[in-house]
Image (cartoon, rainbow, N blue to C red):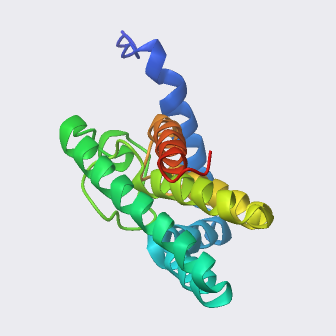
Amino acid sequence: MASAPTPELPRFALDLKVCVLANRWGTRRAVGAAFGIVSRLGDGMFWYALMLALALADGRRGVSAAAHMAATGLVALLLYRVLKRWTRRPRPFHACPGVVAHVAPLDEFSFPSGHTLQAVGFTIVALAWYPALAPLLLGFTSLVAMSRVVLGLHYPSDVLAAIGLGSVLGGVSLRLAGLI
């Protein structure tokens, strides 16, 4: 007699299915390596280099843009740390059979994706100052968001929530700075 299948909660079934499929894609050596690099750049190196480049290349305006990005990034850091401690959602590689972490996580919990929240917030602020950077920053931010799921560190819902939070944070930051 076959055992009954374990019922899945319908609202989480798609989240889990996409997570598993994306993570399997990451088992391809080139895919995993590429997204691992993107993820590490998204740890901060890319954003700090961008802030430095803006400050060096555009004088006082560049310094103002970099400071605005840094302030937004600090708020994003505090926000996602509080949310992670509050929600305590296990990472997919801990909770889902078949999902593996292709890189080591920077912290214990999954919700929201801090990398994505930071990337979206930084991108919104940087594009308000330098719209010509859109192809580079939108492309990189998209890759950072994708990397989090492909590498087994986040569920798609963690990334989508971070996109929403980062968008709100970036918008509020622009409003407070008088840029919108």
Q: In the image, 3: left or right of 99?
A: left
Q: Residue at x 63, y 53 (%)?
A: 25
Q: Residue at x 55, y 25 (%)?
A: 14
Identify which residue, 174 or 74, lies in the foreground.
174
Q: Does residue 15 appear in the picture of this structure?
A: yes
Q: Position of residue 132 (x, y in %)?
A: 80, 66
Q: In the image, 30: left or right of 8?
A: right
Quadrant placement of the C terminus: top right
Q: Quadrant of residue 58?
A: bottom right
Q: In the image, 104: left or right of 57?
A: left
Q: Position of residue 101 (x, y in %)?
A: 41, 59
162 to 100, vertically: above or below: above
Quadrant placement of the N terminus: top left
Q: Position of residue 76 (x, y in %)?
A: 38, 53
Please give the count of numbered marks on the rendered protein.
0
> Most extreme residue toward the bottom, as rendered?
56
Q: Residue at x 61, y 90 (%)?
A: 56
Q: Position of residue 112 (x, y in %)?
A: 38, 43
54 to 175, vertically: above or below: below
Q: Residue at x 44, y 70 (%)?
A: 43
Q: Does residue 26 appear in the picture of this structure?
A: no
